[in-house]
Image (tube, rainbow, N blue to C red):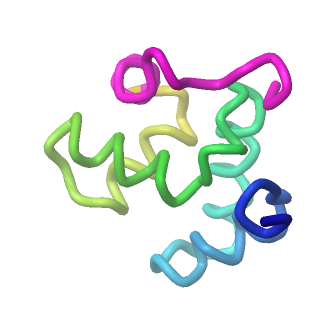
């Protein structure tokens, strides 16, 4: 239960590394995810939702998010179940 309900930036960077992002890219993506209150959703999950919504590959979606682009798609994907005050 603890593992399912908690995460950290280092865990999320690790997930993104396994998805093929470099360490620097993963760090920027995780920071963007955390800044917008979506870390509790999982950075990899956020990137996947962005890729689906933007109709681009995972790498392009992650790099877009790190640049500040595409967040409207993420917000819509998690609408009604998006970031909560506790996750911000």
In the image, residue 69 sits, relative to residue 32, either above or below, namely: above
Looking at the image, residue 81 sits to the left or right of residue 4; the answer is: left
* x, y percent for residue 77: 36, 28
Looking at the image, residue 67 sits to the left or right of residue 9; the answer is: left
* Quarter containing the N terminus: bottom right
- At x 85%, y 59%, the residue is 8
* x, y percent for residue 3: 79, 69
In the image, residue 17 sits, relative to residue 39, either above or below, namely: below
Q: Quadrant of residue 35 in the image?
A: top right
- At x 65%, y 35%, the residue is 38
Task: Pick whichever, 28 or 38, lies toward us.
Answer: 38
Q: Quadrant of residue 40 in the image?
A: top right
Looking at the image, residue 85 sits to the left or right of residue 38; the answer is: right
In the image, residue 45 sits, relative to residue 65, either above or below, namely: below
- At x 22%, y 35%, the residue is 53
* x, y percent for residue 64: 42, 40
Q: Report the magenta residues as a range.
A: 71-88
Q: Quadrant of residue 54 in the image?
A: top left
Going by the picture, which residue comes out furthest to the bottom?
18
Looking at the image, residue 52 sits to the left or right of residue 41; the answer is: left
In the image, residue 81 lies in the stretch drawn in magenta? yes
Going by the picture, which residue comes out furthest to the front?
1
In the image, residue 19 lies in the stretch drawn in magenta? no
- At x 46%, y 16%, the residue is 80
Task: Pick whichever, 78 or 20, lies toward us.
Answer: 78
* Quarter containing the C terminus: top right
């Amino acid at each position: 239960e603890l593992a399912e309900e908690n995460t950290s930036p280092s865990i999320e960077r690790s997930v993104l590394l396994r998805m093929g992002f470099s360490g620097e890219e993963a760090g920027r993506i995780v920071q963007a995810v955390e800044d917008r209150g979506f870390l509790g959703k999982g950075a990899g999950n956020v990137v996947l939702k962005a890729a689906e919504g933007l109709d681009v590959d995972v790498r392009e979606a992650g790099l877009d998010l790190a640049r500040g682009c595409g967040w409207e798609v993420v917000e819509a994907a998690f609408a009604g179940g998006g970031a909560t005050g506790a996750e911000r």
